[in-house]
Amino acid sequence: MAGEVETDLVMQSHINLDKLRGFVRMYIDKHQYKSALFWADKVVTLSNGETPDVYWLSQCLYLTGQYHRATHCIETRKLHQTNAACRFLAAKCHYEAKEYHEAIEILYWPENNSTKTPEKGLDASVTTANASTDVLLTNVESNVSLLKGKIYEAMDNRALAVECFTAALKQDVYCYEAFELLVQHHMMSAEEERKLLESLPFSSQCPEEEMELLRFMYEVKLKKYDKPLSLVVPATLGALGDNVDVVVNLAERHYYNCEFKDCFNITSAVLNKDPFHSDCLPVHIACLVELKKPNDLFYLAHKLVDLYPDKPVAWFAVGCYYLLVKKNDAARRYLSKATTLDRVYGPAWLAYGHSFAVENEHDQAMAAYFKASQLMKGCHLPLLYIGLEYGLTNNAKLADRFFSQALAIAPSDPFVLHEMGVIAFQNHYWETAEKYFSEALSSIEAGQQCVSVEKWEPLLNNLGHVCRKLKKYEEALDHHRRALILSPQNPSTYSAMGYVHSLLGNAAMAVYYFHKALGLRRDDTFSTNMLEKCMQQLLNELNPCEDVPDDLPIPINRSGVEEIITETVDDSELAGSHEQQPNLSSFLANTSDSVLVEEVSMDLEGSS
Amino acid sequence: MELSLIKKQLFTAQRECCSRGLLQSSKWLAELLFALEEVSCEPMDEGWETKGLEAEHERYLLAKNYFDLREYDRAAFFTTFAKSDKLYFLHIYSRYMAGEKRKNDDRIETLVSVPETSNHYLRELRCELEKRHTADTLDGFCLYLYGVVLRKLDLTLDAVNILQEAIQKEPAHWGAWVELATLITDKDMLSSITLQDHWIRQFFLAHTYLELQMNEEALRLYLDLQENGFKQSTYIMAQIAICLQNLQEVDQAVEAFVQLQKVDLYRLDNMDTYSNLLYVKDMRIELSHLAHHVCEIDKYRVETCCVIGNYYSLRSQHEKAGLCFQRALKLNPNYLSAWTLMGHEFMEMKNTQAAIQAYRHAIEVNRKDYRAWYGLGQTYEILKMPFYCLYYYREAQKLRPSDSRMLVALGESYEKLERPRLQEAKKCYWKAYSVGDLEGLALIKLARLYEKLAEDDHACAAYAEYISEAEALGITDREEQSQAYKYLANYHVRSKQYDEAYTYAQKCTDYPETREEGKALLREIAQRRTTCEPFSGASDLPTPVTDARPAVSESTPLSRLSPINLRLTFTKELY
């Protein structure tokens, strides 16, 4: 006995374990994981498997990517049953090794004696070793919740994942990752997000000045698309105005306001500072698509694939490029690669759907959108697109249902309102359609001072169409005129204006506008037919020699211009153009709709 | 206004325009300045160049040089965060020019059909300028650019307002006035806009009157200006020549151009108009001389191309002429008269579709070009689409209400409708005649129409008038004349005025195509005179009358000549 003790003493006198432990920590800090692992292993043997030493050994194994060894190391010693930190690490390793069931089992394992074991583990760490594991244990609860959430998300159990993330955030309001996962993965509707933010215990967990910071930084990241408001940096946080994160969020706001040029300017500036800012990239890619810059996108995508081949955003960029140059097969290939890298990468799913939608493959498009809607519960875009596809396959009822769902998530979203208006228009519910369109318009106007973005040209035009249906011709013309300012030289707008004029019996103006429309789009049968009709009507009104009397005098001389008797316009012509109306309605509804499809499909990347 | 003061303003304005790269305006101002060479004026202040540029002078010089070298994107890039008005103007202008250049480069390959989607840059500029405008931070020159952008986007109403603002702020910037003039569609609109009382306003009014074909008014104003100190101005000389041409004072117009060329030997501006004149007057030698002369000065100018095109066209080398006009359009796709002339050439080559496209482009560039409207009418006449044809003729006639050619064309179209509206046609011919018929076609057409409608008294009066006019002019060799004599002879036979009938029948025998009928009529008159037996009804009228009718209706111009030939000799005289 004595001899043993003595050898022990000798050993200890020879080797200073604490020093070796220090090596382990030092090499981890220096990212020399191999060296750290070597020394950690030695320390464990020397200290005869003390809990903290085992923990650090597993940690090293984890850092070198040897997840199974790490779990084995902990589980053989049954430390996951006694020590919270080890339990967490084991679960983490299982998670990384994609063994989700085992991970969750471990996390729930000691639930019965959880009150005791962590204490023990804590005691052990405090007593036996330096304060090294303390750090790990301060917020272990929130950490565990976060990991649970991630595991549930990976297991497609989204409801539980949300719960866990929320719990994590509530346990530690500084836990940005939980917040980010909730927001970026669109797990909650805007309303729920707001509620969550309000319920966070800022006051109990952080000092006054940090409270404002946190609240602001989180608020900035909340849903931006349903009611894009301008971003105001509080005066006390003025210095943060230049923070890349804040600036990117500003860019995103511009994006949702459809101000792509402004957005692009900001994102370009950000990427100049930080070439691969991960939050900025999706927005930037979306901008490149919107602004139709395939060349820039090509270059960016190439660089990303070279540098980050295992990040979904790189393949997303490639997919978007092919989508932009209309090579849908290739686009699908790369987008699906992005989704295999990260199953919950919603934007890629949406883009995947769009690649089918532009080819009128409605079923496949819908399948992709459905997948996206499962992944992004709190995002209305997949629902909107599903509705759109149903609308295109003449399934107005289902379309309406999905639009309503989308509206429930993002109330007063102008895109959704607009689509609902289109469905109502197709069903000939003119009043309803008008209501939706005007609602959409007013919700845009609420966000901005004036409607000035080209994106809203279809909305204004549709409003014009519906006003025409309701026989409010002057109003219709007004809307069309506004649409023309947003999107000048648009043949369909001209043709619609011509039609309104023809209904007003204003043949000269009608002819003028139909001419303009045909000048821009020659194969427009509607305009051609209407032009013919209006021409004939105009000719009945036309009187080139107004100052010539009906009864010409004999003898002819070059003087004497008498009063003229103007002809009255033939009313039958007017009635004729009214008769054409039903025929036209389907035509116009179709055009408005097809415009929309195009519109929305361009919008997709915004969902990132 | 005092000339020395005008001169001083011209100096400043010229420098301002020049420093902004507004070369056309600056050229115009410099020309005017040169006309006031004799007038004394106080010297200009120094250091104006850097005024308002303080910190950005180097940047300005850089950007301006890039701009001058047509590296527009580069100029725009270096002025992105411009602070001063002048630099900002240069930025916007560079972006505008970059877009225009790109668009023109793109359309060189496809001349006739231009993709209209290529004006994205204009939309961007509009958005940006609109924001600045609401913030009220645009100076006069930027407002001018805003107006130009709006005009290019067909947002006419806004463009007019903005340009007025621009003029308010920078009255001496001639370019803004010219832009405004192109947007004014009629007299009412001209009187409805409020204009600053400035000496340049006279120039604007004259310019606009000319555009609106109010030639007398324009001429009066120009002569006025000439008297009041601008005697030397070549610009005014050229404008007066154009006035004269529009007034159909062809000889005077040619004279004016000759004078202009003497003063300004190497001038290319307006030389295309001159060549049109020479073409119409069929002055081959002069046109040839002019063509060689301008070709020597600068082969690749739109004006040169048009002159040479006209030269080839006069020599009936229509393919070559077409190529010349195409070249002109490559150089400047917004060059109005090249589009119109190109349309004419396509008509000559019987390519109606291309002609329509060309004319439509001309109208897009300037809706006030009556020749293009008229050309469209002609093409649709050939395509047998009477409604369209009528509409286009009507547009042309609106622009020149008292031009008999449009009225005659309108009348013919009314006759050719599926359900002919002869009353309208009658009125057209009548009016064409009463406003002063240029081609002497209206009256005979009116007479024939009366005949067709069996309004014998009217027809008789018209034919008689026609004959008396023709006789007054000493013309005796027209085919129409024989027809007229024949009708009159028959008419008078019917109304038993044998003396008149005898005279007209005599005349008939002078023409080969009616000689036999004339003789028959003479015999009949002699016979009737002897019998002196009153005829009771028209049914037993002698055969000549019934013979005459189909003969007359067959001899409408269309059957005599193929429509293209007839029409084009006609068109070319429209210059």
Image (cartoon, coloured by chain):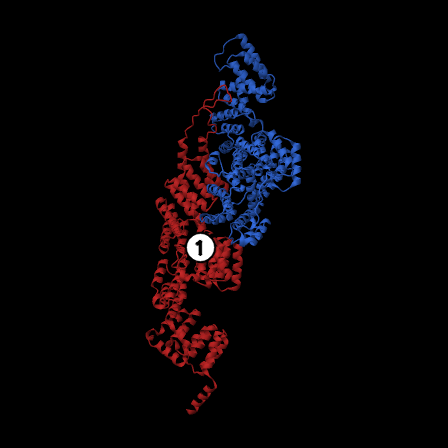
| Residue A185 visible in the snapshot | no
Q: Position of residue A506 (x, y in %)?
A: 42, 35
Q: Is residue B215 left or right of residue A540?
A: right
Q: Secondary structure at mark 1?
A: helix
Please tell me in which quadrant of the rendered image residue A251 appears.
bottom left
Q: Position of residue B234 (x, y in %)?
A: 60, 36
Q: Position of residue B446 (x, y in %)?
A: 51, 23
Residue where numbered disc 1 is placed? A254
- Indicate whether B266 appears above or below A121: above
- Front-most of residues A224 and A462: A224
Q: Position of residue A219 (x, y in %)?
A: 39, 60
Q: Amino acid at mark 1?
A: His
Chain letter matching colour red = A
- Indicate whether A309 appears above or below B560: below
Q: Quadrant of the N terminus of chain A?
A: bottom left
Q: Quadrant of the C terminus of chain A?
A: bottom left
Chain letter matching colour blue = B
> Outermost residue toward the bottom?
A2
- Front-most of residues B571 and A564: A564
- Front-most of residues B384 and B367: B367
- Indicate whether A561 appears above or below A535: above
| Residue A429 visible in the snapshot | yes
Please tell me in which quadrant of the rendered image residue B31 appears.
top right
Q: Residues within 10 Å of mark 1 (few under 14, many from 20)?
A: many
Chain name for mark 1: A
